[in-house]
Image (cartoon, grey):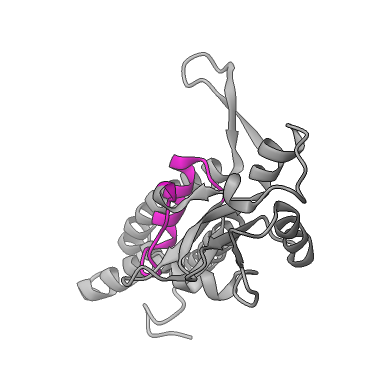
Amino acid sequence: FLIRRKSATSGIPAGPISFQQSTFSSSKMFSRASSSILRVAASRSSVKSAPTCYGRLFSSSIESSPEASAAWKKSCYHEIDFTISDECTVYEAVQKFSAFDIGALITVDDKGDISGVVSERDYVNKIALLGRNSKETKIKEISTKSANLVTASPKDTVDVCMNKILQKDIRHLPLIDETGKVVGMLSVKDLIKEIVSVKEKQIEVLSNFALGKGGHFGGE
């Protein structure tokens, strides 16, 4: 899904940007707008001598980004087995894509350790377009190997995860703990949903603050 942008100088369309990039940019703009609204609302508030801690508390609630582990618990990958042996055929991976309505699987070796990731893109680009037989091709022949994987920690923020996805132009992000074990998988859809959810909560906080409601004023 692409969005057209305009040149800052000429107003002529300067090419498409992805929905993910638009969402991430909007997140930064929202944060700046929130800070401005905070300053204006505070200056107009009848509680002119409100303790500084209120401002810090409000600002924290606006700018905080949840950890990747929070998005993982809501992910469609959370309730399924999202791994597959790299010795299986590509056809078996495609069957799993279809059965669980997902776009990627983490591949494991004969010891159960992560060996890479195989995705729908791999199937389309390396099997379908080349006329190869998915039933005769092993996953390890087309998967992205672990040495080249982009991963995240469950403790990374959603914003950090989204930044990694945008920079590397990928759609899935394995979550690896401090021991090197796979503990989850996030899709770009999971991250966008979490970002939207956070922004909706922030809008509610801003609205309540502007109307003099909520804990910031000791009201309802």
Residue 164 location in percent, x, y?
42, 48
Q: Which quadrant of the figure contains the N terminus?
A: top right
Determine whether 136 is above or below 112 in the image. Answer: above
Residue 86 location in percent, x, y?
58, 58
Q: Quadrant of residue 44?
A: bottom left
In the image, is 93 to the left or to the right of 184?
A: right
Residue under the image location 64 percent in, 44 percent down? 122
Residue under the image location 32 percent in, 63 percent down? 42
Q: Which residues are magenta?
A: 148-171
* Of 202 and 23, the residue lying toward us: 23
Determine whether 129 is above or below 118 in the image. Answer: above
Q: Is residue 1 visible?
A: no
Determine whether 16 is above or below 110 in the image. Answer: above
In the image, is 147 to the left or to the right of 201?
A: left
Residue 78 location in percent, x, y?
59, 74
Determine whether 16 is above or below 35 in the image. Answer: above
* Of 9 and 196, the residue lying toward us: 196
Q: Is residue 152 visible?
A: yes
Residue 167 location in percent, x, y?
43, 41
* Of 9 and 206, the residue lying toward us: 9
Residue 151 located within the stretch drawn in magenta: yes
User: In the displayed image of the protein, which residue is found farthest to the top?
Assistant: 10
State the count of labels. Answer: 0
Residue under the image location 64 percent in, 78 percent down? 79
Residue under the image location 72 percent in, 40 percent down? 127
